[in-house]
Amino acid sequence: MKILRAIFNFYLDSSIHVALAVCSLLYLTVFEYDLPLQWELLGFILFGTISGYNFVKYAGVARFHHRSLTDKLRVIQIFSLLCFGSMVFFIFQLPTRLYLPIGLLGLLTFLYAVPVLGKRTLRMLSGFKIFAVALVWAGITVILPWYAVYETFTHDVWLTFVQRFLIVIVLTIPFEIRDLRFDESALGTLPQKLGVNTSKWLGVVVMYAGFSMDLFKDEFSCAHSSAFAITCFLCALALWGSKEIQKKYYASFVVEGIPIVWVGLFYLLKYYFEISC
């Protein structure tokens, strides 16, 4: 049991779970628009997410406490280095036109973790944190897979980008509620500014707005909308179950696992039950 718990904790702490969530959102775009699956892009996003998230989470610890790192953090550090090397390998397999958007998203991630604005990171800018995360996730999972195939963006793709941006904001709120006791007031997170209950209601409104955008797409998909509706219900449950004092794995496993459930639902509805309209 201890070994299984240690493996599970490593799975979460090393950002493998969040990387699978990001890859799931990538697959949603691929399934929605019947894009060819590019393994090079999948590998880049998988390993890039792991190394990027671990850099954000552990850069400060490694910088100031590198001599006293625990064995667990050293293993994660080595694992992250291997993932970074894998990311570099895959990036050279990608179309060169992807380098600009990748560079911009990578720069945003770097500035999010490294203090270059005086002694502050972008994360410390009041109210910026949640939007930075949503922008990077939406860019990685919508812009990159589409732009890898097509050079121009359609009306539907931009709507999907906004939908993805909004749903990631909703998925981030439980984390901000969880961290309310620890975050500095200067961060200006939604729960800090609006309170917990108002943040939950705002999340529901934002989620409904994102879901409603399916009605404005030129090519309406019953499979996508059905899977999205179920996912919105799960997000609502996750929102209302969020508390300042949460179960250990509530946000880091349950909430972050919702995109994985979402892509599974969409795949089943579209390819197994063959729902189309």
Image (cartoon, rainbow, N blue to C red):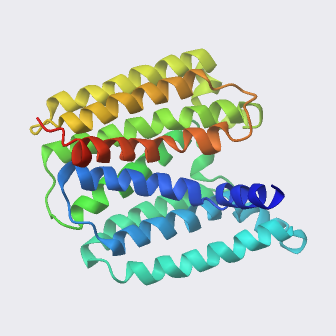
Q: Position of residue 220 (x, y in %)?
A: 14, 35
Q: Position of residue 196 (x, y in %)?
A: 62, 20
Q: Position of residue 262 (x, y in %)?
A: 39, 41
Q: Nearer the viewer, residue 122 or 32?
A: 32
Q: Position of residue 236 (x, y in %)?
A: 48, 24
Residue appearing at x 38%, y 50% in the figure = 25
The C terminus - image quarter: top left
Q: Nearer the viewer, residue 269 or 51?
A: 269
Q: From this view, report whether residue 229 is shown above or below residue 255.
A: above
The N terminus - image quarter: bottom right
Q: From this view, report whether residue 174 is shown above or below residue 85.
A: above
Q: Nearer the viewer, residue 91 or 223?
A: 223
Residue appearing at x 25%, y 52% in the figure = 31
Q: Nearer the viewer, residue 31 or 45?
A: 31
Residue 252 appears in view: yes
Residue appearing at x 33%, y 64% in the figure = 101
Residue 115 appears in view: no
Q: Quadrant of residue 52?
A: bottom right
